[in-house]
Image: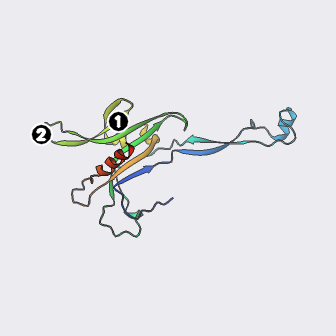
Amino acid sequence: MNILFQQSPPLLLLPLIRFEVVEERSDNGMTQQEAVLFNQVDQNFQPRIVRRQRKIESKVTMEESINIQPHLVGSESSLSSRYKLRGVLHHTGTTSTSGHYVTYSKRMIDDDEGLGGTREQWFEFDDKVGREKSVDYVVGKEDNDMKKNCYLALYERVSNSIDGEVEDASHILGGMRQQKK
């Protein structure tokens, strides 16, 4: 599937297809003749096909930054097409009907050096517990469950300036909070 954009949105939420629909026979694998022989069905035997969702366990490694320029069509915009990863949601569990969701978010925190500065740090939020995590853990470069459980990725547009700072998209998030009230 090829996704095309007319312009670069401030926030880009990428859902990853992590479940697929599979068809299975529900006739215990018997042929019509075997089922009739064992008196389990009448002569109008039709195997029943059941559809269910199955979790896709393939490994996924996220990119810390992406560029959607190849996917922009008909746009002469001055907006940047570069994005930095800001959040990841992943699902743990073996089925689509059970499991647990954990989020990873890049947050600004006070710099450890005590100079009054700030730095960005990745955090894992699992229910009421928050822990610092490395970017390699979050994007799936370290050996962890992130490689096979990525479900959603949130990217924020980077400005066109030379230093590549992330644009402030808080006005969008603030508007979303106001709509919920």
Marks 2/1: CA distance?
26 Å
Q: Amino acid at mark 2?
A: Leu
Q: Residue furthest top?
A: 128
Query: Where is residue 83 shown, x and y percent of the image?
Result: 33, 54
Relative to 162, is 152 above or below?
A: above
Pointer 1: what residue?
Answer: 124
**Residue 79 locus on image (x, y percent):** 30, 63
Query: Is disc 2 in contact with disc 1, using a CB cutoff of under 8 Å?
Result: no
Q: Residue furthest front?
A: 181
Give the image location of residue 151, x and y in percent. Answer: 45, 44
| For marks 2 and 1 on the same chain, the one whose residue lies earlier in the sequence | 2
Residue 7 placement: quadrant: bottom left
Quarter holding the C terminus is top left
Query: Residue drawn at (46%, 40%), measured in percent from left and top?
Result: 149
Is residue 61 shown to the viewer in this render? Answer: no
- 120 vs 97, left or right, is left
Judged left or right of residue 131, residue 57 is: right
- Looking at the picture, which amino acid does disc 1 mark? Glu
Tag 2: Cα neighbours inside 10 Å, few (<14), some, or many (≥20)? few
Question: Can you identify the residue that label 2 sits on?
Answer: 115
Kindly identify the residue that appears in the image at 35 percent across and 44 percent down: 177
